[in-house]
Image: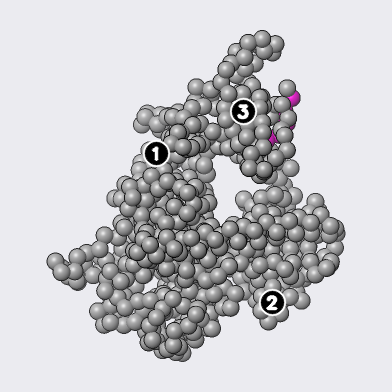
Amino acid sequence: MSNTLQRVFPLHAFDALIRHGYHPVLARVYAARGIEDAAQLEVDWPRLIPFDRLKNVSLMARFLAEAILARKRLLIVADYDSDGATACAVGIRALRQFGAVVDYLVPNRFEYGYGLTPEIVRLAARTEATAATATSSASRPDILITVDNGIASVEGVAEAHRHGMQVLVTDHHLPGDELPDADIIVNPNQPGCDFPSKHLAGVGVMFYLVLALRAELRARGAFSTAWKEPNLASLLDLVALGTVADVVKLDDNNRLLVHQGLQRIRKGRGCAGINALLQVARRDFRQVSAYELGFMIGPRLNAAGRLDDMSLGIECLITDDESRASQIALQLDALNRKRQEIEAAMQDSALILLENILSAPHAQNGQHAAVKESDASSLSLFDPAWHQGVIGILASRIKDKFHRPVIAFARGGDGELKGSGRSIPGFHLRDALDLVSKRHPGLLLKFGGHAAAAGLTIRSCDFEKFCDAFEQTVRSLLGSAGLKRIIETDGDLEESDMNLELARHLAEQVWGQGFSQPTFSTRFTVEDQRVVGQRHLKLKLRKQEAEIRAYGPEKSARPNVLYDAILFAHAVPLPGVIDATYRVHVNEYNGNATLQFILEHWVAADA
């Protein structure tokens, strides 16, 4: 079920933006996204929320300044996704510029799982170099710094203290009932933190920390002619990449960070790794947008953590050697192609599983599903052949198709299943798992995450019990009305606005989670269509409503304006008249820019 609704925008906000000279379509779009003052759209550096608003960040900066001056050994413990990789790269680059003795360790997800676990601490405490870390240091670290993890690492922090190591936690995930006994915690979502932007990504938190550290070192007179003060704006390309790839809400502060990072990349000032990844993706750095970061660069970087070792991705981001960056980017691109093949096979098997397995939880050839999709409020799926590193993407694809909270499981070690979940708007997945854990103590061995995405670990023997518990929880929190898919659009476009100028205006802005890219809804006549690339539909469309209004229902004279459009992953011909939801896009090909509509949803309409 789905409904298409036009986003409502306050007229006073629309009028205010028009008075500031914004294009009427942009004014409408911004007003519908809660922009009431043109100042909210300013993305200049002075509007960044000051770092001292972030609880404990100045305290941690003083701690690190003392550690750097004392030549203590620092070890960053990273996460294995794009946010963790970019946060690690920001930390490594900045701390080395500050003169720190610092290296990093990134857990292999298949051996150690997520976060600062006791096993990772014991690994960090070893003196020999290991395959699970990119560090070549032969000395045990004095201080562990977590990035994009740690807020749930109660046991890991305790283990570090037993080994005589101090722990600094930088994270952005929601805290549980118990905080780790870390020496200092910086997290905008920890109790008592009044930082206005609760949606900072892990890389954003790390960037704020190095801003505070630079200010602390400046106050101590550490910088001189011989040791120049680093320009931390050079790290904003990494901040933008991690923020977009982690799909955090693009509030005013995050949009500023992403905008500034994109500007650096477009001016050719991106780091060697990001430039190399854009090259293998065949994207022009001068035209890069948040879309390229989220859907071209992020997946290639994530592929390292999904299939191999994220140290490969981190090395790509911290090297200044363009040749080395290019070599690593090619490896990441190959891993991403392999990931796509695995994902396609997993998605096919998941759809067959949902089609074949009907009502009660049971097994069929080792595959498991919770309930029949049409009766379910949630979908919990497991196949022993599924790849643990790709189940998150699978859950996202199935969620998009069936509009249900989805958790996909793969085999872990020691009789465990690792699950990765994705949720629909209006349903907080991490809170739902917390409720499951309280109602069924011991069922979840581990869990954590956000509103839209979460991870968990259960025993293999508890899969069916979890399916029932999760389904009951989703039903109680969501109800049947919550399963109705609502497709929000920004309404119709006048033909006078269907042009390259508007497409370019939209392409220059920063769009993403919580500040969605504009979509429009129009009734079109399909004048021509053909399959390209064996799986995509290329279309010629005419705006039907304008046609009827101007020339009457007899259509004796028809306007000549035809619009290029494409419908991805759909090779079946469309009916003659459709109601379409679409994005306005600048199509760059052979040096020419043309207007193109990218169709996202369509339904047949009466001719």
What's the coloring here? one colour
Q: Are marks 1 and 2 in contact (CB under 8 Å)?
A: no
Residue 82 picture location, percent across and down: 49, 62
- Residue topped by disc 3: 540
Amino acid type shown at disc 1: Asp
Badge 2 element: strand
Specify the label residue 416 is tagged with: 2
Question: Where is residue 126 shown, x and y percent of the image?
Answer: 45, 88
Q: Which residues are magenta?
A: 602-606
Give the CA distance from mark 2 to mark 3: 51 Å
**Residue located at (83% from left, 68% from top):** 365
Residue 150 is left or right of residue 218, and the answer is right
Q: Does the segment drawn in magenta span residue 603? A: yes
One can see residue 52 in this view? no
Q: Nearer the viewer, mark 2 or mark 3?
A: 3
Nearer-the-camera pick, 313 or 458: 313
Q: How many marks?
A: 3
Q: Which residue is mark 1?
A: 37
**The one of 288 and 173 positioned closer to us in this rendering:** 288
Q: Residue at 54% x, 83% y: name it.
A: 119
- How crowded pointer 2 is (Cα within 10 Å; few <14, some 14-19, many 20+) is rated as some
Q: As rendered, which of 26 and 126 lies closer to the eye?
A: 126
Residue nearest the observer in this picture, 372 or 172: 372
Q: Is residue 514 above or below residue 360?
A: above
Tell me the amino acid under the disc marked 2. Glu
44 vs 551: above or below: below
